[in-house]
Structures are given as C-alpha cells and as structure tokens.
Image: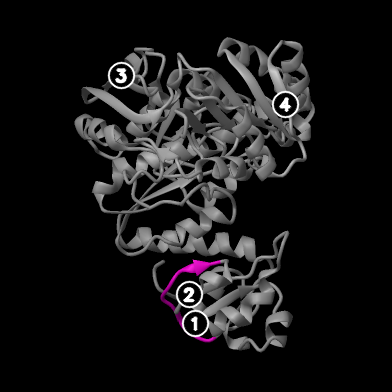
Amino acid sequence: MITLSLTEIAGSTHASSSPADVPVTGNVVQDSRLVGAGDLFVAIAGERTDGHRHVAAALAAGAAGALVQDASVPVADGADPSRLVVVPDTVAALGDLARHSLAALRDRRRTDVVAVTGSVGKTTTKDLLIDMLSARGELVAPPGSLNNEVGLPLTVLRAGEQTATLVLEMGADRVGNLTYLTSVAPPDVAIVLAVGRAHLGHFGGIDNVARTKSELVTGLRESGVAVLNLDDPRVAAMASLAPGRVLTFSASGDESADLYATGVDLDAAGRASFTLHAPGGRAEVSLALVGRHHVANALAAAGAALALGEDVDAVATALATAGPRSEHRTAVTELSGDVLLLDDSYNANPDSMRAGLAALESIAPRRRRLAVLGQMLELGDDSAAEHAGLVPELLDRQVVEIVVVGEEAAPLAAAAADAGIRTHDLTGRPAAEIADAVRALLVPGDALLLKGSKGSGVWEVADLLTSDTAATSLPGTPGDGMMPA
C-alpha cells in the first residue's frame, strides 16, 4: 500500500474518531496472526470470530492502527484509543480505503487494472494473466480467489508505488456486486468469460446473472477496453454497454472475433494446442493446462495482454509456460498403481462440472473413469434438475463409477444409479472415510475426477489422496516446481 497516515485513513473512511497522525507503512490485514510492524489491522465480525476481540493483540504485535466499528471491546482489552479509526462499518470502510488508495496511486503513476469475471474460469484466467503481464513490472494479484467485498479491497491495498499492473478477480452472487467492486477499482481492461448457472439460487435466473456480469463492463474507465466472449451470446451482447473499445474472442474459431483459435488439439495429457489469430498476427500456442475449456481462458487473457500493448509472440510464449497457480484447479497427480487423479475440487457449478468431466475424458481416453462429485450449492429451485442433469454427461464421458457427497446431490445419486452407473452416496461421512472408500474402488490404470462446490468438502478428500506417499504431481500443476508461489 502507498503510505497513508491514520488521519488520512480516517478522512477517507467516514470515521467518527480523530486518531493519531501515525503512518501506516505496512500492509492492510484482517487476520491478527499475520500482523507485522506498521500494518493496519481491519476488525471484521465474521461467522467464527469477531476481529474486534483481536485488536489489542494486533497493536501489541506492531500494527500502526486498527479500523474498527466498535471501540469498546478493544479499549476494554487495553488498546490505545488514539490508534483506532472508528467507522460505521469496517467492510464498507475497507472498500472506501481501497478506492482512495488506488485513486491516489493512479495520480502518481500509471497502474493498469485488469479485472476478470465470469461464472467459470475466473481464477485460471487470473493466473494466466500473472504470467503474461509480469514482464511489464511489478504485478499485484490475489492468491486463490479473493474476489468479494473483503478480498478485493485487500488485494487493491497491496498495490504500491512500484505497481505497474493490478490483476483482480471480481465475483458476484447478487445483482449489484460488481457495480460496487468496480466502484472500488475501476478497471482499464474488463474480461467477461461466460454467463453460467452459478449462484442461480441468489440471482433468481440466468438473465440476472448476465445483468450482473455486465456491471463489469459498465464499470470500466472511459478509456477502458472490454474483452468479451463472442461464443456466449449473453456476453457478446454486452459490447453495446462498453464505454470504449471492445475486443472479442472465440474458442470455437469464429473468424468475426478479434481473437480466435483454430486447429484445437489435445495431447495425450489433455493439454490443448491451437493457432491463435489476433489483430497483431498469428502464433502457435501450446498450453500447459489440462482441458479444452482452457482455450477460452487463454484467449481472454491474450486479449487483455494485447489491449495493454503486448505482442502476439510474447503472449504465445507466456501461454506455453503458464500453469495453474491456485490449488484444486485441474491439477493432475499420478497415484500409486498408475492411477491418474484430476483435482478440480475448488468449486463447482453445472457448467464447470461438465468441463471437468470433459477434461477427465481428455486425460484418460483409454482408462476406466471414476468421479467423486460433491454437491453444487446455491442453485435454488433448479438444484435437483441441475444435479440430475449431469447424468447424460457422465454417460457420454463413460464414467462408470461415482462417489456422491452432499444432500443437494441426492438427485444426482438417484439418477446415476437408475442409469446404470455404479453409485456410492457417502453424504455425511468424514473426508478420511470417503478417501478410504475411494482408494478401495481404484484399480491400476484408473482415472479419477474430484469436483464439487467448496462447501461439499471434496477438496479435503483430494488433499488426502494427493498426500499419499507415492503421489506425484505431473507437469503443469501446482507444486511441481513449475509455478512460483
């Protein structure tokens, strides 16, 4: 973060207190265990704990000050009142502070903000952008998926005097979410990947999903560039909302797009290669990522890089070495007995489930295929139909045996069993027991997909299986030494 005093922070966050004029020279953190000298601690009341109970400890650990909405608890614990910035709402104040800090930074230097949204592919595209844009100078991006009203401002506040590029994920589960996030960090480049069926229970329908994703486009700076998926009609329609230039991309090879792919082919490991066609020329691209669906993510990232002045050859070179930086996203591990494990268990919705099953087939065309499938959350009234609707995909991809986890996935278990797929419903069992059951199902030469919403806990099963002594990460996956932390 650029250096700000507690007094300046109070002025930008609608504070009711007048704190000491002490400089914040470190980071902005919400976890008191991570506080270092000169940091600003933000006290947020969460589901498990209230940060206000840790303010005194954060100050004792060297924090310059704390952002609080209730001073009584910290003061009672011995916190120095002059180090407290008291605001009506710490989450809102965190956004205000990030907005102020980014505006001040942009007044001093050029810092390009690239934002990405979509029902699928956000984190992978963000990871690709890190590799493609790092040569421009210091780059700040979130680890994992810090893409909400807390995570995004915390990422913005990591940008400092030397930051050339700020790459942000913007997630949403309600109309208006992206309007708020773009008000905090108005993007120079906005990528919209797809309008899918994630969070349907909150949105109330696919049209509201599209409306919300379009908020990223309308939130662009006047000089900003929208990078839109021409293969998704709802995304393509957002071009009319862009304040300025639009770049479109097409993984299906639509030549009317600004960037498109032809000759898409998968190698024996399921990694795609293709010819990239772009305004600045064409180049051959070979991805390190597993799955055909990553071609669209690669084109989107390439469009953003070209919008910022990178050339086609540099983009192709970066894509060839870029792999997943985030855990549980299309990571391939070889278990003992020549078993391939495809871990895509970070999260799931109907579209990403189908993409995961397609990726399983691509890495294991001649292997027996199995899957551990967790429930897909936040689908509302469509939940039963969406879960049962995965069965045709399972049959098409010749998945012969599945383990199902989660009450919402009961319709999937029933429909799969009716279709003749060997089905084991292990809902309610601890992760260790599920992992043991999966090990008992596997035979040498199998291929296994793990996929589910984060709340299903399938990622815990993945961790247990990949921690087995003989498990080996394959090239292009997190932890193989290819990707820096």
Region of the chain picked out in magenta, as a range: 20-29
Position in image of residue 276 (x %, y %): 28, 21
Q: In this view, does 75 lie above or below 384?
A: below
Q: Quadrant of the N terminus?
A: bottom left
Position in image of residue 331 (x %, y %): 45, 36
Residue underneath mark 3: 274
- Where disc 1 sits, the SS reads loop
Tell me whether circle 3 and circle 2 mark residues in contact (CB < 8 Å).
Answer: no
Residue underneath mark 2: 39
Residue 326 in the figure: left or right of residue 321: right
Q: In this view, does 95 lie above or below 366?
A: below
Tell me whether circle 1 and circle 2 mark residues in contact (CB < 8 Å).
Answer: yes
Mark nearest the camera among 2 and 4 is: 4
- Where disc 4 sits, the SS reads strand
Residue 403 placement: quadrant: top right
Residue 460 in the figure: left or right of residue 189: right
Q: What residue appears at the point 71 percent right and 27 percent down from the top-left corner? A: 205
- Where disc 3 sits, the SS reads strand
| Neighbourhood count class around disc 1 (C-alpha, 10 Å): few under 14, some 14–19, many 20 upward | some
